[in-house]
Image: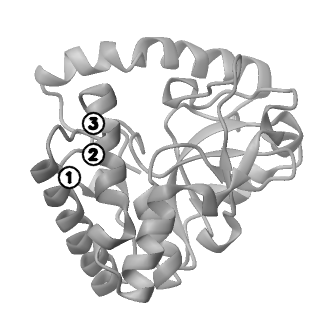
């Protein structure tokens, strides 16, 4: 598995911004404490999209963002979830790709535009034109995944940075079930719509009960023929 792209000076600033040195230290400490099978920050796992039905709901003290990737964390953080149907992006994708509703009529364009008005920027978009262009790219992504019959790993993509960083981000709950954790809503929705049996994902936080039960060993196995 490719972990890094060829060294480029432009990646140095991003390495610092994404806290890669801190992640590397955590990886080392994890190996010392949990052994060679310990989770690694930003590592790639494989999940069945049909098993992802919950969305992690960030609460005070449990933001658990991408910088926390590879942590083993106890507690009840994994109980803070909502149905994936509550994701506006997921609902819009299903309406568009399954029911043939235009992006505008799903309400997602106006919804994102409201977020832009509030925050100045949302998902890299600053204008209505940016948002429309983004959703045109979603159509192209859907068609590419449908044609290939699979979702590419991050190492196959031009924006590849480190391991599976920026892939579909999931936490693993105490029962070993993946939950969507805030990045990759559209890709997850497309994978579900197309009925993909397995997709690569970016490992987030894993509950110790799942780790102790060997769930990570299973999730690390790529699908046959991959």
Question: Which residue is tagged 1?
Answer: 131
Q: Are marks 3 and 1 in contact (CB under 8 Å)?
A: yes
Q: Secondary structure at mark 2?
A: helix
Q: Are marks 1 and 2 in contact (CB under 8 Å)?
A: yes
Mark 3 or mark 1: which comes first in sequence? 3
Q: Are marks 3 and 2 in contact (CB under 8 Å)?
A: yes
Q: Nearer the viewer, residue 8 or 171?
A: 171
169 is higher (above) or lower (below) than 29: below
Q: Residue at coordinates 13% horizontally, 27% vertically from top-left?
A: 8
Q: Residue at coordinates 74% horizontally, 45% vertically from top-left?
A: 81
Q: Is residue 25 left or right of residue 104?
A: right
Q: Nearer the viewer, residue 217 or 132?
A: 132
Looking at the picture, how far across and down is residue 218, in whole percent?
72, 59
Q: Nearer the viewer, residue 146 or 208?
A: 146
How many numbered circles are shown?
3
Tell me how far mark 1 sits from mark 2, CA to CA. 8 Å
Tell me how far mark 3 sits from mark 1, CA to CA. 10 Å
Looking at the picture, how far across and down is residue 37, in whole percent?
70, 38
| Picture quadrant where residue 135 is located | bottom left
Q: Is residue 14 left or right of residue 90?
A: left
186 is higher (above) or lower (below) than 103: above
Question: Which residue is tagged 3?
Answer: 116
Q: Secondary structure at mark 1?
A: helix
Q: Secondary structure at mark 3?
A: helix
Q: Residue at coordinates 72% horizontally, 17% vertically from top-left?
A: 32
Question: Which residue is tagged 2?
Answer: 113
Tell me how far mark 3 sits from mark 2, CA to CA. 5 Å
Q: Is residue 123 left or right of residue 129?
A: right
30 is higher (above) or lower (below) than 70: above
Q: Residue at coordinates 40% horizontally, 39% vertically from top-left?
A: 165
């Amino acid at each position: 598995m490719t972990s890094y792209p060829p060294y480029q000076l432009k990646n140095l600033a991003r390495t610092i911004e994404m806290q890669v040195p801190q992640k590397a230290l955590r990886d080392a400490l994890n190996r010392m404490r949990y052994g060679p099978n310990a989770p690694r920050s930003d590592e790639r796992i494989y999940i069945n999209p049909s098993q992802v039905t919950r969305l992690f709901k960030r609460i005070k003290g449990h933001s658990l963002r991408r910088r926390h990737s590879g942590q083993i964390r106890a507690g009840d953080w994994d109980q803070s979830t909502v149905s994936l149907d509550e994701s506006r992006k997921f609902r819009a994708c299903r309406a568009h790709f399954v029911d043939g509703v235009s992006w505008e009529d799903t309400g997602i364009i106006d919804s994102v535009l409201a977020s832009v008005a509030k925050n100045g920027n949302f998902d890299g978009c600053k204008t209505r034109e940016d948002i429309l262009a983004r959703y045109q790219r979603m159509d192209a992504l859907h068609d590419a995944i449908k044609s290939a019959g699979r979702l590419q790993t991050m190492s196959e993509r031009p924006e590849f940075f480190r391991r599976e960083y920026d892939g579909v981000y999931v936490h693993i709950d105490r029962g070993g079930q993946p939950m969507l954790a805030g990045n990759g809503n559209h890709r997850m929705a497309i994978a579900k719509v197309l009925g993909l049996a397995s997709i690569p994902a970016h490992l987030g936080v894993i509950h110790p009960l799942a780790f102790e039960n060997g769930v990570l060993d299973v999730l690390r196995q790529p699908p046959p023929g991959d």
